[in-house]
Amino acid sequence: MNREACLNEIEPGQTAVVKELLSDGSIRRRLLDIGLVEGTLVECVGRSPGGDPSAYLIRGAVIAIRSEDSTRITIHEQR
C-alpha cells in the first residue's frame, strides 16, 4: 500500500517516489538541479549520528538533505 508523506519520514532502506517539491528559492533550484523532480525514485541510505541530515540515493548519487528541507518534499511511500 502506498501512502503520502514527507521525505524525512522514510527510514534507511525504504524507498519513495517524489510527488511534489514545496520548497522555493535557491533550495528548490538545487533540488531540481540534482534531479529531484516528480516521479523520481529516492532511497534513504542513512542518517547522520545526530539524526540530521539524512542521506538519500537520488539518480545514482548519494545526497545529504537537511530535515527542514526534506519536510518540504512530498512523496508516495513504497512499502
Image (spheres, rainbow, N blue to C red):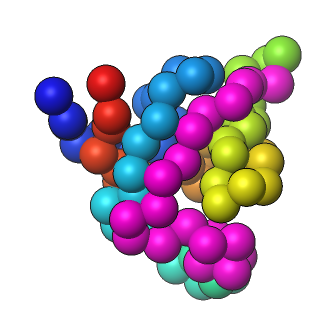
Tell me what residue is drawn at x 61 percent, y 22 percent.
12
Using the rendered view, name the quadrant where residue 32 is placed. Answer: bottom right
On the rendered structure, is 18 left or right of 12?
left
Q: Dividing the image into 4 quarters, which one contains the N terminus?
A: top left
**Coordinates of residue 40 in the picture (x, y in percent):** 47, 62
In the figure, 60 relative to 30: above or below? above
User: Farthest residue in the right direction?
Assistant: 49
On the rendered structure, is 9 left or right of 65?
left
Q: Residue 72: within the magenta? A: no
Q: How many marks?
A: 0
User: Farthest residue in the top direction?
Assistant: 49
Q: Residue 46: within the magenta? A: yes
Residues shaded magenta: 30-48
Residue 58 appearing in the image: yes
Tell me what residue is drawn at x 54 percent, y 48 percent.
42
**Coordinates of residue 78 in the picture (x, y in percent):** 33, 34
User: Farthest residue in the front direction?
Assistant: 60
